[in-house]
Image (cartoon, rainbow, N blue to C red):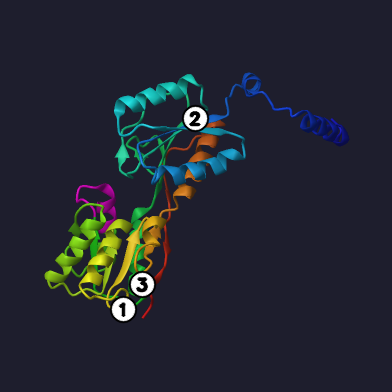
Amino acid sequence: MRPETRLRVRQAADQLGFVANAAARSLQTGRTYTVGMITTDTIGRFSIPLLIGAEDALGAGQMSVFLCDARDDPIREQYYLRTLLSRNVDGIIVTGRRTQARAPIGAGLPVPVVYAFISSADPRDCSVVPDEADGARRAIRHLLDTGRRRIAHVTGPEHHHSAQVRGAAAAAQTDLAAPILHGEWTEAWGRQAAGILLSGGADFDAVFCGNDQIARGVAEGLREAGRDVPGQVALVGFDNWDVMVDASRPALTSIDMDLEGIGRTAAEVLLAAINGAPLHGPITRPCRLVPRASTTTR
């Protein structure tokens, strides 16, 4: 059409309130312009930012996302997988609340699958994951740059993949002031760990924590013991969860894994696969440090 004709058609469509028929569009293109997202993250701590990032990327192509919460139930997960496939989605994003590799969601699926935040144990699958070791190194370098030299590390369960990766990277960056303390991913453990460090006579002037909940608990434990943060002890968390970092006293320096960016990248990779250009293997995205009052430079 000539530009002026196209303009008149669009104006007429707007006046009539015309909406394109998605079913007819699907018949013409062979696509439904829908994507499924299956998550095990019940509370949405990780899946909601990932969903926002994915929608940012998919919205440009006018694609919709169906979010399904499997609740760590393999039977429910397979039900949602079958449901999404019966709806002829163009692709699927699989995510969860842990970065540890999981078994593939299915074999020989008729649509491309991309794993986001969580990774697939099959190296042929594409997984978009945060570089947690990079985040830990950034935390330690920041503490060293602020003049701290005796750094302790408090983190989650010893068997947990994230705790292992972040702890190993921290220990490789500097000689830690005390053995790594492992516990739960909770504020209560952070308070307890602060007491262990103090009662054990550890000589430390900074604590790098495996997540923000632990860091907030450590901050409370240090404050109750009369230790000033950051005057006597600097503190860095991990995740940059606004609920925790902004409510902490003082506001908490933390490592941000850019969950929305991971979601955007996963959606872009999925779109490429839908269009016939799949990628394989892990795609790691760097973390960033967000400085706040808990590590004010001396």
Residue at 66%, 23% (x, y): give it.
21
Position of 58 relative to 179 (above/below): above
2 vs 3, front mark: 3
Q: Is residue 200 magenta?
A: no
The amino acid on which the numbered mark 1 sits, given as a three-letter code, is Gly
In this rendered view, identify the residue nearer to me: 1 or 223.
Answer: 223
Q: Secondary structure at mark 2?
A: strand
- CA gap between label 2 and label 3 equals 43 Å
Query: Is 141 positioned to the left or the right of 202 in the image?
Result: right
Residue identified by numbered label 3: 295
The amino acid on which the numbered mark 3 sits, given as a three-letter code, is Thr
The amino acid on which the numbered mark 2 sits, given as a three-letter code, is Gly
Query: Is 174 positioned to the left or the right of 55 in the image?
Result: left
- Range covered by the magenta-colored residues: 156-167
**x and y percent of residue 189 in the render?**
21, 57
Q: Quadrant of residue 199?
A: bottom left
Residue at 46%, 24% (x, y): give it.
84
Q: Secondary structure at mark 1?
A: loop
Placement of the N terminus among the 4 image quadrants:
top right
Position of 100 relative to 134 (above/below): above
Q: Are marks 2 and 3 in contact (CB under 8 Å)?
A: no
In this rendered view, identify the residue nearer to me: 97 or 100.
Answer: 97
Placement of the C terminus among the 4 image quadrants:
bottom left
- Badge 2 local density, few (<14 within 10 Å), some, or many (20+)? many
**x and y percent of residue 122 in the render?**
34, 34
Q: Is residue 163 magenta?
A: yes
Residue identified by numbered label 2: 91
**x and y percent of residue 23 in the render?**
62, 20
